[in-house]
Image (cartoon, rainbow, N blue to C red):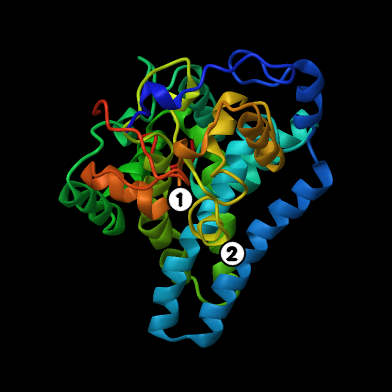
Amino acid sequence: MVPSPDLLADVLPTERLTVSGMPVPEVRRELRRIDNLRNVGSVVLCWAQAAITIGLCTWIGHPLAYLAGIVLMGPVFARFLILGHEAAHKLLFTNKRANDFVGKWLLDAPGLVPFGIYRRSHFAHHKEEFGPTEPDIAFYRGYPMPASSLWRKLRRDALFSSGWKNLTPLFRALKSATGRRLAMPIYVTQAVIFAVFWAIGHPWLYLVLWIVPWMTSWRVINRLRAIAEHGGMEASKDRRKTTHHVRQSRLASFWVVPFNTGWHLAHHVDMGVPWRNLPALHRELVDAGWVVPELEYPNYRALWKALASGAEVDAGIAGKRATASGEGTAGSHPD
């Protein structure tokens, strides 16, 4: 899955990019600008999508509507936790207290993620992908793998097995004072969410339309996104060897990679660039010739197919893709 050397053009540094691909200070200042007001709207959008999805399912009141709700709540959790990831990077709001409060209480806690623990482990991921302290190595190693093996993992995700493994640490945390303190925002927030379901006369829907989707559809989405970011890659200072790039689409943005998280190569080149500016950073990398069309997968289906079979796919306008050169959770949160 790692690109062959002939696709890794040695064109850096340039007037606008350093040798690692990170923008020079003048360009970086513009790309690292945080849009506080629009990010407030993005947080509101997360909650609005959750409310509309749950409200429609409740109004229809049919078992098929609840089944559809379980599926559609997966992308809702993706939105909560992608913005929580943004807050973990201190990129959601310029005010640190507001950034951490919203990230902890309004984004990560609804998705049953301890904000502080995630922030620490995630920075280890950025320090050295596939390194000795990589928290998500269980997600990325072993690719390409047989399609039957990937389907087995996805079935476990869809049928509660992975969800239960990620839920039990919250129960174990009750046994210690430190654990209770770290998990308290989750306990409180989940209690409030349950109270809302109770107030509208459907307390049982907290399980059906909140906990069940978190344990099933979100787990499938989380794995598919994670392997599309780093599956089958390798440790390297050259981020083109650690991170895939996939052509983005609105359909993928809705289901798997909201809030520009699909521009993941740019995110790993400079993790200080807010999500709104990742496409602009990617264009800088393309204009410099550091990212060439052959490095891009045309869509996520093509990348997942390669990850599941090792078969080569047409991954760019030149119709050429690198051959696989090697094989290989912090499972509740985006990378």
Q: Does 320 sit left or right of 262 as displayed?
A: left
**Is 313 in front, or is 32?**
313
Vertical placement of residue 159 versus 272, above or below? below
Q: Residues within 10 Å of mark 2 (few under 14, many from 20)?
A: many
Which of the two discs, 2 and 1, labels the residue nearer the N terminus? 2
* SS assignment at label 2: helix
Vertical placement of residue 239 versus 324, above or below? above
Evaluate whether residue 140 shows in this view. Answer: yes
Q: Residues within 10 Å of mark 1 (few under 14, many from 20)?
A: many
Give the residue drawn at x 34%, y 33%: 322
Marks 2 & 1, CB-CB < 8 Å contact: no
Give the residue drawn at x 23%, y 48%: 150
Give the residue drawn at x 72%, y 57%: 44
Residue placed under numbered mark 1 in the picture: 298
Q: Amino acid at mark 2?
A: Ala
Q: Position of residue 122 (x, y in %)?
A: 50, 27
**Is 119 in front, or is 234?**
234
Q: Position of residue 31 (x, y in %)?
A: 76, 31
Give the residue drawn at x 47%, y 20%: 124
* SS assignment at label 1: loop
Q: Which mark is residue 50?
A: 2
